[in-house]
Image: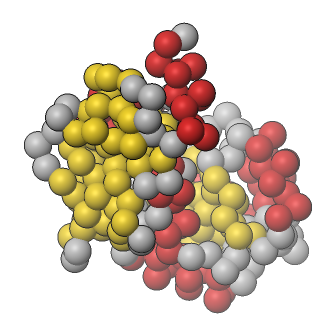
């Protein structure tokens, strides 16, 4: 994906550059401190993803985002202020990152953008995770369940297991909520992979996965409705 960033703070742009260099499917082509220059670039070049500051002296990021509302460019707000979250939701921005931006949240936003782009062009939805020193593409349709052990996740697919350093909450933020559900403090399951629902567990393939009582009602509603 081709990305650009607009922020009046050079230090903030440098953070985004460093993060983008670690993500294999994002190319941060240009960074801008001027809204006028960024808008000129967008008019002349295709851009998939824009990282956009909100509080800027020449134009608010919310006003800038309105100019792109009918384009294919996905917008991620990057700001030190949480006050614009509601307006961002109304503008249908893809994500809302608070400064200082951590790499995990940056990657989550990138994966979300990748998923949206895949939907638009009709490809199978997927995301990238770091497995050791390598980046691995995980196809969502292949996932059976995901297990957490402290700060590691084990993604169990039909024919392989991928290990990545991430929390279960971070992973849930990247998965489509209509296809995946957390059923225990340590487990996420793909709803379509569940073969049997019992009082305290579900069966996925030949694996019994514990079902916590706090998630049972929602799971039953999702499976049995």
Left or right of 194, for residue 36: right
Q: Decide which of 204, 21 is in the foreground and name it.
A: 204
Give whichever of 187, 95 is nearer the camera: 187
- Quarter of the picture holding the C terminus: top right
Whether residue 24 is visible to the viewer of this picture, yes or no, is no
Q: Residue at x 83, y 69 (%)?
A: 81
- Left or right, residue 98 beside residue 153: right
Q: Position of residue 135 (x, y in %)?
A: 25, 65
The residue sitting at 62% across, 75% down in the picture is 101
* Residue 99 on image: x %, y %: 70, 76
Residue 198 in sight from this viewpoint? yes
Give residue 32's position: percent from left, percent from top.
63, 73
Where residue 24 sits, quadrant-wise, is: bottom left
Nearest to the observer: residue 30 or residue 180: 180
How many discs mark residues in the rendered view?
A: 0
Q: Looking at the rendering, which quadrant does residue 56 occupy?
A: bottom right
> What residue appears at the point 37 percent right and 66 percent down from the top-left corner?
149
Q: Quadrant of residue 62?
A: bottom right
Which one is nearer the viewer's eye here, 141 or 182? Answer: 182
Question: Seen in the image, is 72 located left or right of residue 121?
Answer: right
Q: Residue furthest left?
A: 159
From the image, which quarter does the N terminus lie in? Answer: bottom left
């Amino acid at each position: 994906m081709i990305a650009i960033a607009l922020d009046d703070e050079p230090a903030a742009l440098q953070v985004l550059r460093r993060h983008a260099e670690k993500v294999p499917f994002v190319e941060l082509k240009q960074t801008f401190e001027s809204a006028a220059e960024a808008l000129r670039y967008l008019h002349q070049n295709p851009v998939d993803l824009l990282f956009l500051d909100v509080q800027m002296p020449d134009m608010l990021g919310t006003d800038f985002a309105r100019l792109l509302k009918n384009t294919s460019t996905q917008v991620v707000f990057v700001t030190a202020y949480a006050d614009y979250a509601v307006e961002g939701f109304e503008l249908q921005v893809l994500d809302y990152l608070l400064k200082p931006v951590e790499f995990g949240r940056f990657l989550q936003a990138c994966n979300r953008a990748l998923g949206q782009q895949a939907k638009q062009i009709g490809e199978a939805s997927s995301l990238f995770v770091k497995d050791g020193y390598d980046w691995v593409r995980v196809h969502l349709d292949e996932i059976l369940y995901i297990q957490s052990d402290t700060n590691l996740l084990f993604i169990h697919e039909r024919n392989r297991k991928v290990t990545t350093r991430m929390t279960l909450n971070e992973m849930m933020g990247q998965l489509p909520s209509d296809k995946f559900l957390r059923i225990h403090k340590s487990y996420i399951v793909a709803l379509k992979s569940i073969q049997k629902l019992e009082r305290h567990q579900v069966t996925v393939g030949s694996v019994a996965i514990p079902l916590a009582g706090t998630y049972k009602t929602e799971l039953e509603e999702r499976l049995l409705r």
